[in-house]
């Protein structure tokens, strides 16, 4: 049976994450090896020529699953009929820019894009925001899309999740595939909290196995939380291939489900679980099935975790208040 192609819109398609992402979408890694895709590349006018170059390269790969590519700088065209939207293009922080300036500049991008999604996307649209500050940009886009169910707007913390798995595997000498049930809580920022208290390493509780709170507090958490800055320092540019890989993982898991006995981390609108104020787009442990996600309930949160979750959630609340004051939500 021939499947109907899925329309996938990528914003910031001519950027470095876009370049690492598009070829993997077109080769079937985003949705599965039997799902054809139409690509819509949304850029600003200055990015169109580079996006055309990337589209030429996509053609030259002759990917069997890639049905067509459209390139545009019009959000209404870019999101027309979109089933999956990856919002990657964002305004980076530049020298001398205050946080309010950054939020305001990104509001100018994510508010109209949220509206264009509201007005043009398919009914089953799923949105992943990658562009920073990802959680708050997702909140801005969501607020501009009142006709789309709020839970379809998600922010990426899968890169942090993958980074944490890798660090824990290195510490314990385990294979990454032996690590399950790790959680990133809060914001995709330096305040995020990678939690190993419920994680398992080859079936054993990770925190008990490591049994080293100093390593947790002084090495593991800061290494994961500041990894983005360390990559920028080392590469002279922010993470690109690993960010694209995490975006692929996020959507693939959302659509195709988490493995039994495991969960993942996604930035999603809070329903009030674990004391996170309702509506904030915060990272939680989630399981996914049939294209839907659910927050893992009933986890004991110890004092060590509580303080750190609260600090990151507090930062999210401050970002929300700032964009509210700017009239962006
Ligand atoms: P980049 O500067 O290489 O590319 C960004 C692209 O977005 C550019 O081509 C630009 O023209 C385009 N763009 C800007 N405004 C746009 C708009 N309104 N509509 C469409 N396109 C637009 O940046 P990058 O390295 O690809 O990173 C993109 C974003 O992802 C940044 O905000 C970065 O901080 C963020 N990021 C997030 C994570 C995460 O884990 N959530 C990880 C890495 C990077
Ligand atoms: C990352 O986590 O690698 C990025 O969010 C860093 C950044 O500021 O782009």
Image: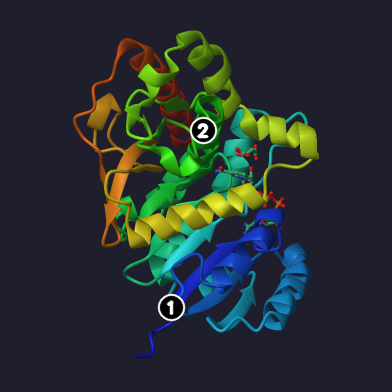
| Depth check, front residue: 70 or 212 | 212
Quadrant of image for the C terminus: top left
Q: On the image, numbered disc 2 is attached to which residue?
A: 169
Q: In the rendering, at what x and y percent does residue 221 appear?
A: 52, 21
Q: On the image, numbered disc 1 is attached to which residue?
A: 34
Toward the left, the furthest residue is: 298
Q: Helix, strand or loop at disc 2? A: helix
Q: Residue at x 46, y 11 (%)?
A: 212
Task: Give the crowd class for mark 2: few <14, some 14-19, many >=20 residues within 10 Å.
Answer: some
Q: In the rendering, at what x and y percent does residue 6 appear?
A: 43, 76
Task: Indicate which disc, 1 or 2, sits on the residue closer to the N terminus.
Answer: 1
| Depth check, front residue: 152 or 295 | 295
Q: In the rendering, at what x and y percent does residue 13 appear?
A: 65, 63
Toward the right, the furthest residue is: 236
Q: In the rendering, at what x and y percent does residue 167 appear?
A: 55, 30
**Alpha-carbon distance for marks 1 and 2?**
32 Å
Q: Residue at x 43, y 60 (%)?
A: 252
């Amino acid at each position: 049976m021939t499947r109907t192609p899925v329309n996938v819109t990528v914003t910031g398609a001519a950027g470095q994450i876009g370049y690492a992402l598009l070829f993997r979408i077109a080769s079937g890694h985003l949705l599965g090896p039997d799902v054809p895709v139409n690509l819509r590349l949304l850029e600003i006018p200055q990015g169109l020529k580079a996006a055309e170059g990337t589209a030429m390269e996509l053609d030259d790969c002759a990917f069997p699953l890639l049905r067509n590519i459209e390139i545009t700088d019009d959000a209404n065209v870019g999101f027309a009929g979109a089933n999956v939207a990856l919002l990657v293009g964002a305004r980076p922080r530049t020298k001398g820019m205050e946080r309010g300036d950054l939020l305001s500049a990104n509001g100018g991008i994510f508010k109209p894009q949220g509206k264009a999604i509201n007005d043009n996307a398919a009914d089953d649209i799923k949105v992943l925001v990658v562009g920073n500050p990802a959680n708050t940009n997702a909140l801005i886009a969501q607020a501009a899309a009142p006709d789309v169910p709020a839970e379809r707007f998600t922010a990426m913390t899968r890169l942090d999740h993958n980074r944490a798995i890798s660090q824990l595997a290195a510490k314990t000498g385990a294979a990454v595939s032996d690590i399950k049930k790790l959680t990133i809580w809060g914001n995709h920022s330096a305040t995020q909290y990678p939690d190993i208290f419920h994680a398992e390493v080859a079936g054993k509780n990770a925190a008990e196995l490591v049994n080293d709170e100093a390593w947790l507090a002084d090495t593991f958490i800061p290494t994961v939380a500041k990894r983005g800055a360390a990559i920028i320092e080392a590469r002279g540019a922010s993470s690109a291939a690993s960010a694209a890989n995490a975006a692929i993982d996020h959507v693939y898991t959302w659509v195709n489900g988490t493995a039994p006995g495991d969960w993942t981390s996604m930035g999603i609108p809070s329903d009030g679980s674990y004391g996170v104020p309702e509506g904030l787009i915060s990272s939680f442990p989630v399981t996914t099935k049939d294209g839907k996600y659910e927050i893992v309930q009933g986890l004991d949160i110890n004092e060590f975790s509580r303080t750190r979750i609260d600090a990151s959630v507090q930062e999210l609340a401050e970002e929300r208040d700032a964009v509210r004051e700017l009239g962006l939500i």
